[in-house]
Image: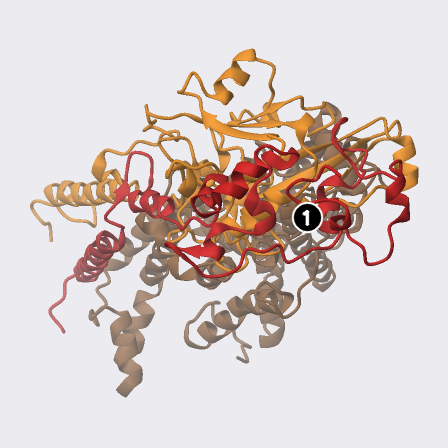
Chain colours: A brown, B red, C orange
Amino acid sequence: MYDLPHNALVNFILPNNEEVWWSLMIVIYPFLTGLIAGAFVVSALYHVLHLKQFKPVANFALIAAFCFGLFAGMPLLNHLGQPQRALQIFGTPHLTSAMSVFGYVYSGYMLLLTTEIWLIYRKFFIQKANETTGIQRRIWYVLTLGVTTYHPESAQLDRRLARILAGIGIPWAVLLHGYVGFVFGSVKAISWWATALQPIIFLSSAIVSGIAILILMYTFIHWRRRVSPDYTMIKKLAIILWASFLFDWGLEMLELVHIWYQDSHEWAVVMPLILGPLYGSYVWGQIIWLSAVPVFLLGYAVLYAGNGRGMLFLVNVGSFMLLSQVLFMRFNVVIGGQLISKSARGFVDFHWDIFGKEGVLAAVILLTAPFITYYVLSRFLPIFPKAENDQS
Amino acid sequence: MKNTSRLSHLYRLGALFLVFIIGFLVIKQLTTPSSWNYEVWYRGASLIENANKPLLHGGNDSCKTCHEDVVKEVKKLKHKRLSCEGCHGPLAIHVRGDEKIADAKVINQSRWQCLNCHEELISKPKGFPQFTSEVEKHTTIEEGETCLKCHDAHDPTP
Amino acid sequence: MKKTNSDSSPLGSKSRRVFLKQIVSGTATTLMIYASGARGGHKIARMWKQKSTKHHWAYIIDVGKCIGWGGCVRACRQENDVPEGVTRTWVERYVVTEDGVYVDSPKGGAEGFEPLSEDLKEKAIKSFFVPKMCNHCENPPCVQVCPVGATYKSPEGFVLVDNDYCLGCAYCVQACPYGARFINPEKHVSDKCTWCHHRVKNGRQPACVEACPTSARIFGDLKDPESEVSHILQEGIWTVLRPSMHTGPSCFYIGLPREVI
């Protein structure tokens, strides 16, 4: 049992606090943009830093980031009370608001990502345009922008441009997801949100989620195609994942310790929050099961589990747990912050909605759409290097 | 098209971008409201629209126009500071222009009409008249009887 | 085969590189200027740059006078077409005891208050009503966070919502420290107390002020030295809600007990 804050005898919430205004859609939005940022960083390991061991996943990461990116705006559009006015974010962005940068940063980033992918796959488009006929040819022709001859001298130019875009793309991806952290961290009215660390926490957990989802997708795809995965590369990715998560978790715990230590008006409402409504999802779910356990699991996997299928299995279990941790974190932050009533003397109930506009069904649809899109794209584009025993 | 150079694809990409950007800027210009106030960042017309919303309550002075005698009378009594519309409803439901469109009688004649203010609650300011059982007549009220049996709504002194 | 005027750059000659660089930077700058809407020389600025010199409105709540009638909440609901389930103004009841503070606001106080339990009545050290609403802050965090400029501070000090422009994103609802804002369940845009801007601009008072029988709610112009609000505020014994938030509220409370947050 937990006490109510500020000596409250009964749970008192303000009349306008009965509804949690930012619901599941605003939970999955930062989750999706986080996947974009994380996947892009993985692709940049090869495209910018030229780390050869990550070449096999470089294009895969880009296409995955693109698929996540296609749907990143959908939860927001679904959430808006007046979605037909969404384009006003381009017309009159109010620059005192962190949220106002979304329109240009998101669409600019998608343009950058599309251009980078186009530069990389242009040769393939040309090849396909020359091989096919009829409607198929028309589509590939459009994708080549009408240039159906591949000039070998363009290769170096394309690569350099792609590298520049990838280089610009890193800070841009940082902004794309970092601003979300600022949207929350700058709200002084909500004690669970307001911290200067919020953008960094969001960003580092985004990178964790991106690496984790790529490991999971990679393993699944190679299992389905019955192609042997690159164990060495996976192990290196897992080490980066582990290190990134230690950093992320360190920051999350630092923030909590800081609020606890200062024992100020924030702790007065945060303590009953995490010992009360958020006890299950935050203390047990996010911290104990999905943070502490995977740290040890992943540590064991990369240090002692060898270089084969055993290691791969443990890494995947750890990745899945960390992916869930990030989703839990988004939920606990977004919903949790709103559970503290502005009365500072009570907590709001969160009601799970299944079929509504911001319900679980809508969230599940929006979360699976990128993977379906990836599957469709993978039927047309060569994403992984062709292997000998490829049975796709 | 065979006579493309090694930069043709970049020129076409650039041209595509240019078309897109120009189109975007044109659409943006057309869809941004013309009354936009760039200093303070809001739609200037909104200020006028907000000011022109319909008024529903007229205030006690508006009741004087037709009910001057009643208003003057109440002004001498204990309930002089009450808003007429607080019990009788807003002016806009009763009158449109100069014509009466509906009655403004107090529909709810139950005890709650009075107890809403005068029920004894410890949170009320000291000295505010509250319905107590200290008054002898209040202990013998029957079922179905309202305060109006002994008190006049405009002149509540028993 | 050496080309005469090209360096080893795949982009071609030096002059072409410079030209391309200019195009890119020029486009980028133009885009950024357009993105910031700088056609009128807009700066990233704080709110309320066009303060009116005619009026400076203020709202005063005298806590000791409120009787918890709730007619103010009803008058506001009718005047401003506020749907059930949300409210633009509300009244809270506090009961301070040795064990803690009991607060309630059933339906925002719209139907008055039921008597307390005997237990609570016995333990009560003091009890009172506190009306609340949007504070029309001088430094409103809700205006700061609106992504498109759909809420703003008018030159006379009203914080208003542009119903035809609001996206309904609810960022302003999150940012308000007082819980004064909500999303209108019928119009799906942000909504809040407007101090009955449409009434004040026509020389009337807000509906809640007119309804109040005990003058617990007072509204007036601080630019008028003879107004009641000017007299009261000059005495200097007033406070505001959540002063630590530095929002600069324009609703001033007389006799506000320290238990009120």
On the picture, is A203 further left or further right than C153? right
Judging from the image, mark 1 belongs to the subunit labelled: A
Q: Confirm whether residue A37 shows in the render.
A: no
Query: In this orientation, which residue lies closer to the viewer: B20 or B1?
Result: B20
Residue A359 to residue C182: above or below: below
Left or right, A196 with reference to A122: right
Q: Is residue C99 above or below residue C164?
A: above
Decide: few, some or many residues near mark 1? Use Cα within 10 Å; few <14, some 14-19, many ≥20. many
Q: Position of residue C120 (x, y in %)?
A: 88, 37
Count of numbered circles in the view: 1
Q: Locate residue C137, reporting x and y percent.
A: 49, 30
In the displayed orientation, state which residue is furthest to the left: C4
Side of B153 relative to A113 (left or right): right
Dot 1: element: helix
Q: Position of residue C51 (x, y in %)?
A: 34, 26
Point out residue C251 in the picture as x, y percentages from the top left corner. Answer: 54, 28
Q: Residue at x 46, y 77 (%)?
A: A379
Would you say residue A45 is visible in this rendering?
A: yes
Residue C182 vertical placement versus B128 (above, below): below
Quadrant in the rendering for residue B8 = bottom left
Q: Residue at x 53, y 33 (%)?
A: C135
Q: Nearer the viewer, residue A143 or A269?
A: A269
Task: Give the residue type at disc 1.
Answer: Asn
Q: Residue at x 67, y 45 (%)?
A: B153
Question: Quick one: quadrant of the N terminus of chain A?
Answer: top right
* Front position in the image: B117 or C50: B117
Furthest toward the top, the residue is C235
Please give the residue where the numbered disc 1 appears in the rendered image: A332
